């Protein structure tokens, strides 16, 4: 079966998680196999996390879909991602923000920052910048961000990420050690911050100054 056919089957299966069409359409446009190491090409369109080396994973497609859905991403937004990994989630968000938007994605492990950058280049994304650094401190250079997506689990929501979230912004972040919750953080127009737990998830740990 061709990659596109496998992708259609995968995306169709995600519809039943209540994911909005905008996110499903964006995921339909991203060739996930480009972001998956050679050894796992056969499973690139299965709904599961896959190893990308250095004890890290590319997240399962349903998790990418849920996080993008919760973020309610629109055209032209500036987004910070913490944990580039393969670059796949950044690519899906790049589709959602379009040419006028931009994704800044920070990865701690130099080899993975390079992997993500190469994958994004191969797939043709020009509106994504990969930065190798400790993303638990955020990325002051380009703040504030309308959306923040954290793809590794923190002990608590890092203060710098709350500070770097724009007013009326949304952040999604897995929080906890062992038992993790995906938390949706919202900042209102006056700068008040609220937290809502979405449900249980399993992510690799956020390692860094404001992580583990
Ligand atoms: N978003 C990725 C994708 O689409 O492939 C999946 C990310 S993987 C589940 C989590 C990533 O977070 C790993 O690549 C890990 O190295 C990275 N990470 C952990 N702590 C970090 C930190 N403090 N700053 C930046 N990246 C971090």
Image (cartoon, rainbow, N blue to C red):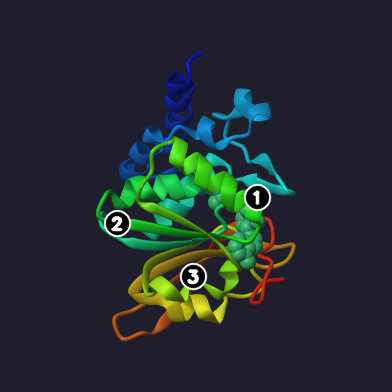
Taking 169 as reference, is 176 left or right?
A: right
Q: Quadrant of ligand 1?
A: bottom right
Q: Give the labeled residue for mark 1.
A: 111
**How many numbered discs?**
3
Residue 108: x and y in percent read 63, 61
Of the numbered discs 1 and 3, the one sitting upstream in the chain is 1
Q: Which mark is residue 196?
A: 3
What is the x, y in percent for residue 90? Answer: 45, 50
Image depth: mark 2 or mark 1 in front: 1
The spot of residue 137 in percent (x, y) is: 56, 75
Residue in front for this viewpoint, 115 or 82: 115
Is residue 24 found left or right of 65 in the rendered image?
A: left
Residue 16 appears in the picture as rendered? no
Q: Earlier in the sequence, mark 2 or mark 3?
A: 2
Earlier sequence position, callout 2 versus callout 1: 2
Q: Residue at x 57, y 59 (%)?
A: 199
Q: CA distance from mark 2 to mark 1?
A: 26 Å
Looking at the rendered image, the disc whose residue lies closer to the viewer, 1 or 3, is 1
Residue at image location 74% in from the left, 49% down from the top: 55
């Amino acid at each position: 079966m061709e990659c596109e056919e496998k992708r259609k089957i995968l995306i169709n299966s995600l519809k039943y998680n209540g994911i909005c069409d905008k996110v499903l359409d964006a995921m339909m446009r991203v060739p996930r196999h480009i972001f998956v190491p050679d050894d796992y090409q056969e499973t690139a369109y299965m709904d599961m996390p896959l190893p990308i080396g250095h004890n890290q994973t590319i997240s399962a497609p349903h998790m990418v879909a849920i996080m993008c859905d919760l973020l309610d991403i629109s055209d032209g937004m500036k987004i910070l991602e913490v944990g580039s990994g393969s670059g796949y989630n950044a690519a899906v968000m790049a589709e959602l923000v379009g040419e006028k938007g931009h994704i800044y994605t920070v990865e701690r492990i130099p080899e993975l920052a390079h992997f993500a950058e190469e994958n994004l280049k191969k797939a043709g994304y020009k509106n994504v910048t990969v930065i190798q650094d400790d993303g638990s401190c955020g990325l002051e250079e380009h703040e504030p961000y309308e959306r923040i997506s954290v793809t590794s689990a923190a002990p608590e929501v890092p203060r710098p990420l709350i500070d770097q979230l724009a007013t009326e912004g949304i952040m999604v972040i897995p929080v906890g050690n062992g038992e993790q919750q995906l938390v949706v953080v919202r900042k209102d127009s006056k700068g008040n911050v609220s937290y809502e737990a979405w449900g249980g998830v399993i992510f690799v740990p956020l390692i860094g100054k404001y992580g583990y």
